[in-house]
Amino acid sequence: LFAWTGSAVAIGAVGAGGAAAVLSPAGAASPAPVADSPTLPGPVPFHGIHQAGIATPTQGHLLLNAYDVPGTVTRAQLTATLKAWTTTARSLTAGKLVEQDPTISVDGDPAALTVTVGIGGALLDRLGIARPGPLAELPAFAGDELEERFSGGDLVVQLCADDPLVLAGADRALRKAAGATVRPRWQQAGFQGAAARRDGRTTRNLMGQVDGTNNVSTSERARSGPVWVDATDPGWLTGGSYLVVRRIRMLLDDWEKTPLDHQEKVIGRHKHSGAPLGSKLETDPVDLDARRPDGSPVIPADSHVRLSHPNPGEEMHRRGFSYRAGILPDGTSDEGLLFLAYVKDPTTSFVPVQHRLAQHDALNAFTRTTGSALFAMLPGITGPDDWYGRALLS
Ligand code: HEM
C-alpha cells in the first residue's frame, strides 16, 4: 500500500543534477550522489487539483504543526501569510533553497517533501465564514484523555519527507515566512519503517503489527471517492479533504507482557504475517462471518479489525505515523501512533467508526488518546498564480 510508484523517474531527475543543483545557495552544483548511496525519491509535484501529501505514498518522516491565529489578525494579514506559505512551499518542494532556510537542508534533495495546509473551524467562525457541516467539532469519545497541548488549532501544516533534515529546514522556513500572523500551538513528529518505502511492504507500528493493509487508497487525479470533497458546497473546499488527527499513546509495557495469541485476538490478525485470523496471507480478505467449530467467531467480536471495518460510506484513507516523544515523569515512555485520516466527511466516516471503537475495541486496554484535532484541508494549488485558500479568502 505504501509502494512508491514514481521512484525511477524521480531518482533519474536528481541524479541528472536537476533537483540537486538548485539547492546550492551560491549557484554551484551540489556534489554528485555517491554511486551506491541510498537514493531519495526526489521532488513530488506541487501543483494539482489536490494538495500533495494526501494521495502521495507515505514518506518516511512527518512533522505536523498546528498554529493559532490571534484574534487581532485581519483577513488581509492571513491572506499574506497563506501567499507567503505558497511561495515558500513551491520552492522547497522543488528542491530550491529559500532565503528563510538557515541552510539546514542545503546538502539534500527535496526528499519527496510535501507541504499540506488546512484550516480549523474556530478560525472560520472568527472570519465570519460559514463552517461546512463536516467541520463540526468532533464529539467527545468514551475514554479520551485529551490534553490541550496536543489538540485543536486554527491552521495545520503537514510536512512529510524522506529526510528529517529536509523537514527541519522546511519547518524553520515556513515558520519564518508566516511572521507574527500565526503562533505555534503544537508540533508532532512521526516516522514510518523504512521497509515500507524500500520494498513497498506495509509498515509495522510500535506494537509490532502490520498496519495499513486494508487501507482505502486514492489518487492525485480522482475527483470523487471517500477522500476528496467533490460537492460545490462550500465551493472553496472542492478538491480538498478533511484531516482527523488523533494522538494515541500505546501502553507498550502492558502490551509486551500480553501473550501473542491474545495480542492477535485484540487486533483480529496474525502478528507476524499480518494475515486475518484463520488465514495465511496479509492480503487475504477479512472474513467476519467465519466461525470456529464451537460457533464462536474466528475474528473476535471485540477485535479492532471487526469494529473498525467500514460500513458503506465510512471509508477513510489512513496516513498514520509512529511517534516517540520521550520518557514521562513516571518513567514510562510516551510513544504510539499519530493517527491521521483523510476523509470526504468525518461525520459519516471517522465519527461513527470511532464511537464503535471507543465503546468496544479490545485495543483500548493498551491505548490512551491524548490529542485530537480536525481540519479542512484546502484544495490543490493549480498553477503558479494560485495560493493556499485563494477560493476561501479572495
Ligand atoms: C486496521 C492498528 C487506531 C481504523 C488496523 C490494523 C491494525 C491497526 C494493526 C490491521 C491492518 C490494517 O488493515 O491496516 C491500530 C492501532 C491503533 C489504531 C495500533 C491505535 C493505536 C485506529 C483508529 C481508527 C482505526 C483510531 C479509526 C477511528 C482502522 C480501520 C482499519 C484498521 C478502518 C481497517 C479495517 C478493515 O477494514 O479491515 N488498525 N489502529 N484504527 N484500523 Fe486501526
Image (cartoon, helix red, strand yellow):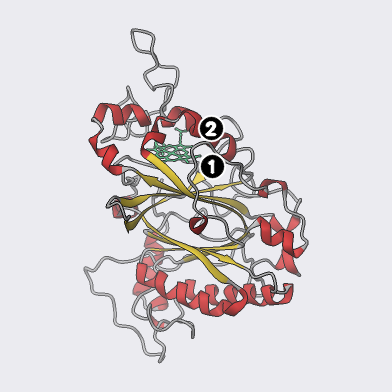
Along the line of sight, the residue nearer the viewer: 308 or 241: 308
Q: Residue at x 52, y 36 (%)?
A: 142
Tell which residue pokes out farthest to the front in this image: 330
Q: Residues within 10 Å of mark 1 (few under 14, many from 20)?
A: many
Q: Quadrant of residue 192?
A: bottom left
Q: Residues within 10 Å of mark 2 (few under 14, many from 20)?
A: some
Q: Mark 1 — residue?
A: 316
Tell which residue pokes out farthest to the top in this image: 294
User: Can you tell which mark lies on residue 310?
Assistant: 2
In the visual, does 72 lie left or right of 258? right
Quote the CA–CA distance across marks 2 and 1: 8 Å
In the visual, does 213 lie left or right of 271? right
> Does label 1 point to a residue whose CB lies under 8 Å from ligand 1?
yes
Task: State the image coordinates of residue 25 (x, y, percent, origin top left).
Answer: 41, 88
Along the line of sight, the residue nearer the viewer: 251 or 115: 251
Q: State whether residue 318 is above or below residue 27.
A: above
Tell which residue pokes out farthest to the bottom in this image: 26
Q: Which numbered disc flags the more N-terminal residue, 2 or 1? A: 2
In the visual, does 345 lie left or right of 302? right
Task: State the image coordinates of residue 158 (x, y, percent, origin top left).
Answer: 50, 62
Q: State whether residue 383 is above or below residue 125.
A: below
Report if residue 91 is visible in the image.
no
> Does label 2 point to a residue whose CB lies under 8 Å from ligand 1?
yes
For the N terminus, give its image quadrant: top left
Amino acid type for the residue under numbered disc 2: Pro
Amino acid type for the residue under numbered disc 1: Met
